[in-house]
Amino acid sequence: MTALVVRDDLSKRDPRRHLSKSFIAQTHNCGQRAWFSIHDPRPWVAPEKVTFGSAVDAGVEVIVKALERGEQPDVNDAWDAARLRVDGETNTPNDLEVFAALASFAEWSVVHEVHWPGTVTQPHIRLELDGIGEVDAHPDLLLPQGYEDPRVGTIVDIKTGKAAKPANAAATSYTELGLYALLVRETEKPPYPPMSVAYWTYVRSKKPWWQEVVAPVTPHLLSVARHRVAAVARAIEADALLNDGVTTPTNSVFVAPPRFGCSDCQYSPDCTWAEEAQEEAA
Ligand code: SF4
């Protein structure tokens, strides 16, 4: 039987009720798009790079669950789950490329080094953070404590991308891995066990490969993550106050320009920020 990998529909989450990792990331990737998601939510057609990532993510989860049970993973099972995950999407990924990513994950040296029993996949963490409010996130993997350095109680996010991540990507991932670490730490009591964060990325280059970048969870990572998340929470409050009772709400709090272009955005082409970004780039 094909394993079913279920994910929440993130488009239905309202950041004014509880902050999500996705919304926080969006404020960084394009402030206007984040703002629109509050004031004018619209459906979005995921591009291939996103559906490919979703498929690989689902397949990896099936492989990891088998490893966690002490079983030999079946890449065909993982592939079935991956295809099911993106069934019905407009821009479906190439099946064979998804299979290749999963097969190489199962053979990856890192996968053979990890102590899997006790690993948790896709934990749903929703917590009240002091001075911030309710925050919601789903890290991909929580590796168990007690394993040797550097993968100690590691929080792993599975990624796919055209390019490898820089060596400091995990150490500086304040609003993603840092946020996950903040939430996981919040569930623990001192003395805190060591913890690390990692990106495992399938790099879709000419010769695709899996890359690991890992970093210890430091007080700096946690502190910057807390401040960044608090800043987003304050911006949501300010936006509500500034637009209270106005006929046409405007965005004056989420100011980050689009980092990855506008071609995949559901607010393009009628978003005025897109024109401004193009003019600046010209
Ligand atoms: S069209 Fe571009 S600038 Fe406008 S919301 Fe979308 S990504 Fe942002």
Image (cartoon, rainbow, N blue to C red):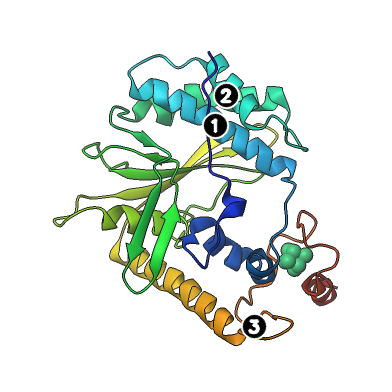
Q: Amino acid at mark 3?
A: Ser
Q: Provide the residue designation for mark 3.
A: 252
- Along the horizontal axis of the image, is 206 left or right of 223? right
Q: Badge 2: few (under 14), some or many (20 or more) residues near its Cα, within 10 Å?
A: many
Q: Badge 3: few (under 14), some or many (20 or more) residues near its Cα, within 10 Å?
A: some
Q: Secondary structure at mark 3?
A: loop
Q: Residue at x 25, y 37 (%)?
A: 148
Of 73 and 241, nearer the camera is 241
- Along the horizontal axis of the image, is 212 left or right of 202? left
Q: Amino acid at mark 1?
A: Ala
The residues bearing labels 1 and 2 have C-alpha atoms spaced at a distance of 6 Å
- Mark found first going from the N terminus, 2 or 3: 2
- Mark found first going from the N terminus, 1 or 3: 1
- In which of the image's four quarters is ligand 1 placed? bottom right
Q: Is mark 1 in CB contact (under 8 Å) with mark 2? A: yes
- Mark found first going from the N terminus, 1 or 2: 1
The residues bearing labels 2 and 3 have C-alpha atoms spaced at a distance of 42 Å
Q: Provide the residue designation for mark 2.
A: 81
- Along the horizontal axis of the image, is 18 left or right of 125? right
Q: Badge 1: few (under 14), some or many (20 or more) residues near its Cα, within 10 Å?
A: many
Residue found at the very far left of the displayed protein: 191
In the image, residue 1 above or below residue 228: above
Q: Provide the residue designation for mark 1.
A: 58
Q: Is residue 279 visible?
A: yes
- Kindly indicate the quadrant of the structure image that contains residue 122: top left
- Kindly indicate the quadrant of the structure image that contains residue 185: bottom left
Task: Report x, y in % for residue 259.
Answer: 68, 64
Q: Secondary structure at mark 2?
A: helix
Q: Amino acid at mark 2?
A: Ala
